[in-house]
Amino acid sequence: MTETVQELGAADIQKVLELLPHRYPFLMIDKIIEIDRDESCIGIKNVTVNEPQFTGHFPNMPVFPGVLLIEGMAQTAGAICCRHIMSDTVQTKQVFFMTIDKCKFRKPVVPGDQVRFHMKKLNQRKTMWWFRGEARVDGALVAEAEIGAMLVTA
C-alpha cells in the first residue's frame, strides 16, 4: 500500500499582504503555516507591547483584546479562502465578516505571547465560507469561535 504525502502550504507576511486588504494597525496575523487547501491552516500573531491597543487596554496590565483574537481568526480564514479562489481571471476584492457563533474567551493574552489561530473549514456555499477557530498560546486554548465570511470577487 502506498501512502499519499500531502504537501502543506504557507504564506509569509508578503503573501498575507497580497491576500488581505488589512494593514497595520489592523492586520492581526504575521504569517500562515500548514495551509491545507481551503480546509485548514494555522495563522500566527506575535503579540508585542508596542501595539497601539495596549495604550488603553489596559495601561498598567496590558491584555490583548478578545475581539482582536476573533478578528485574527477571521483574517486567517479569509486569507486561505482568497488564496484558494485566486486565479488569473478571479481576484478577491474584499472579505466581509458575516457571522460569529459559539464564541468563548478562556485565558488572557499578553505581550510576549505567540497566538496560533487554528482554523478548520466547516462549510462553503458559493462565496460564503464557515470556519471553526481556536486561538492557542503555548498549546493552551485562549479563545474559540465559529465564524462566517463572504468574499466579493471581480
Image (spheres, grey):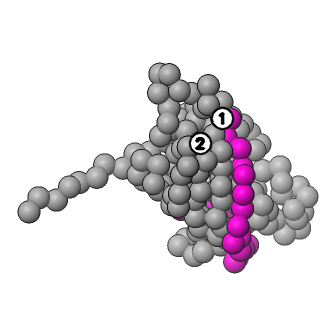
Q: Amino acid at mark 2?
A: Thr
**Residue drawn where x is 72% and y is 57% of the image:** 99
Q: Earlier in the sequence, mark 1 or mark 2?
A: 2
- Per the image, label 1 sits on a secondary structure element best described as strand
Q: Main secondary structure of the magenta part?
A: strand
Toward the viewer: 41 or 110? 41
Question: Position of 1 compared to 45: left or right?
Answer: left
Q: Are marks 1 and 2 in contact (CB under 8 Å)?
A: yes
**Residue drawn where x is 64% and y is 64% of the image:** 146
Residue 64 is drawn in which quadrant? bottom right
Residue 59 is drawn in which quadrant? bottom right
Location of residue 97 in the rendering, given as x and y in whole percent from the top left corner: 72, 49
Q: Amino acid at mark 1?
A: Val
Residue 147 is drawn in which quadrant? bottom right
Figure quadrant of the C terminus? top right
Q: Which mark is residue 152?
A: 1
Figure quadrant of the N terminus? bottom left
Location of residue 11 in the rendering, given as x and y in whole percent from the top left corner: 49, 42
Q: Is residue 116 magenta?
A: yes
In the rendered view, would you say 100 is above or below 6? below
Q: The magenta stretch spans which residues?
A: 94-118
Toward the viewer: 24 or 21? 21
Q: Which mark is residue 127?
A: 2
CA gap, disc 1 and disc 2: 7 Å
Q: Residue furthest top?
A: 88
